[in-house]
């Protein structure tokens, strides 16, 4: 029996009543920096799937935590209002699946009991979990947060001090959170390295698992998406991060010319090459910490992921 969990919307009964008609029933839960954005686009190309117009609405994240972790998204109505959330699938009522992908959904325990919230509202949902070699993923996660001014510490200290990086790469921990609420038949794991190397084959298996008709992708539909750049950035001034996350800037950037927004961003930040940063200490520490967690995850899914052996 699913325990009672407070839903993030104001009227949970109304939300649950609306679910069978127009709500989501497919979730890409992450992991962060493991190809979920690309998978979102690939699945959206299938005629039986309608993916959300907002890629990461974070509706099932604890709202207090979302306001701290991602204030820009927390101000978007789709992150907390059920009717606005349903509006992310215009014309999707006839699709077999209405999907969304929010990487905060696989960062337990940092954003509340997301799996329980999804299960309470959408018990028949299909869950897709994308994973990547855990050490490389954790470092990519650090650089994403550093670029967004959310991580002030240098890499070597941050991966030790902030459990978010190692917990998100603890795929056994994250998968178990969903197995506590969903049967294994409703969960499908995709390895990012395998998707990148054999996109048609990996997607064909996923579409078959979704019990949809086979789909022949055009080459353009399988193009690379959201590759991380070799550079990062840091603020020039102490208040850059506060201004970036403010409601005032959120309004201003919608009305300013795109060229001016770019100029202000460049003037307020410094760009540098990530290759100049020694990652060896962080990699060694993460490798030792995550090795047994990788083994536990591979035992859970019943196979060894050889694509990670030489990452």
Image (tube, rainbow, N blue to C red):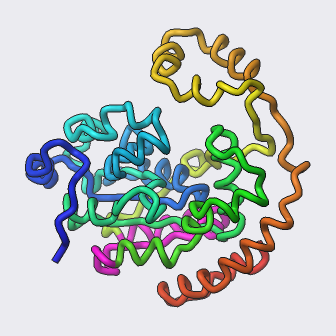
| Residue at horizontal 48 percent and vertical 86 percent from the top | 300
Asked whether 202 or 172 is in front, the reply is: 172
Asked whether 299 or 225 is in front, the reply is: 299
Task: Tell me residue 288's x, y (percent).
Answer: 73, 80
Res 266 seen here: yes
Task: Tell me residue 99's x, y (percent).
Answer: 34, 52
How many marks can you see? Answer: 0
**Vertical relation: 159 (above or below) 73:** below
| Residue at horizontal 31 percent and vertical 32 percent from the top | 77
Asked whether 57 or 112 is in front, the reply is: 112
Magenta stretch bounds: 180-209
Residue 195 is one of the magenta-drawn residues: yes
Residue at the limit of the structure toward the right, as seen here: 276
Asked whether 268 or 204 is in front, the reply is: 268
Q: Quadrant of the N terminus?
A: bottom left
Residue 67 is one of the magenta-drawn residues: no
In this rendering, would 301 be left or right of 288?
A: left
Magenta span main SS: helix
Res 198 seen here: no
Task: Tell me residue 281's x, y (percent).
Answer: 84, 67
Task: Tell me residue 123's x, y (percent).
Answer: 21, 66
| Residue at horizontal 52 percent and vertical 65 percent from the top | 130
**Vertical relation: 162 (above or below) 297:** above
| Residue at horizontal 46 percent and vertical 67 percent from the top | 129
In this rendering, would 28 be left or right of 210?
A: right
């Amino acid at each position: 029996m699913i325990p009672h969990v407070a839903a993030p919307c104001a009227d949970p009964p109304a939300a649950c009543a609306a679910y069978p008609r127009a709500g989501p029933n497919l979730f890409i839960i992450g992991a962060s920096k493991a190809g979920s954005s690309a998978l979102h686009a690939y699945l959206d190309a299938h005629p039986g799937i309608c993916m959300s117009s907002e890629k990461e609405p974070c509706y099932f994240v604890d709202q207090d935590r979302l306001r701290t972790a991602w204030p820009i998204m927390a101000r978007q109505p789709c992150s907390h209002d059920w009717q606005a959330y349903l509006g992310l699938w215009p014309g999707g009522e006839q699709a077999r699946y209405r999907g969304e992908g929010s990487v905060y959904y696989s960062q337990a325990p940092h954003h509340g009991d997301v799996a329980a919230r999804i299960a309470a509202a959408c018990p028949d949902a299909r869950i897709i979990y994308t994973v990547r070699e855990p050490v490389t993923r954790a470092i990519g996660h650090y650089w994403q947060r550093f670029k967004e001014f959310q991580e002030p510490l240098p890499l070597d200290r941050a991966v030790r001090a902030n459990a978010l990086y190692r917990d998100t790469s603890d795929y056994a921990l994250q998968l178990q959170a969903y197995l506590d609420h969903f049967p294994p038949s409703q969960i499908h794991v995709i390895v990012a390295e395998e998707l990148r190397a054999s996109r048609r084959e990996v997607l064909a298996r996923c579409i078959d698992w979704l019990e949809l008709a086979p789909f022949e992708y055009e080459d353009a539909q399988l193009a690379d998406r959201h590759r991380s750049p070799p550079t990062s950035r840091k603020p020039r001034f102490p208040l850059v991060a506060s201004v970036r996350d403010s409601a005032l800037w959120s309004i201003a950037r919608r009305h300013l010319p795109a060229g001016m927004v770019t100029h202000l961003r460049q003037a307020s930040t410094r760009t540098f090459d990530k290759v100049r940063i020694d990652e060896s200490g962080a990699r060694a520490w993460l490798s030792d910490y995550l090795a047994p967690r990788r083994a536990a995850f591979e035992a859970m899914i019943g196979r060894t992921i050889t694509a990670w052996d030489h990452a």
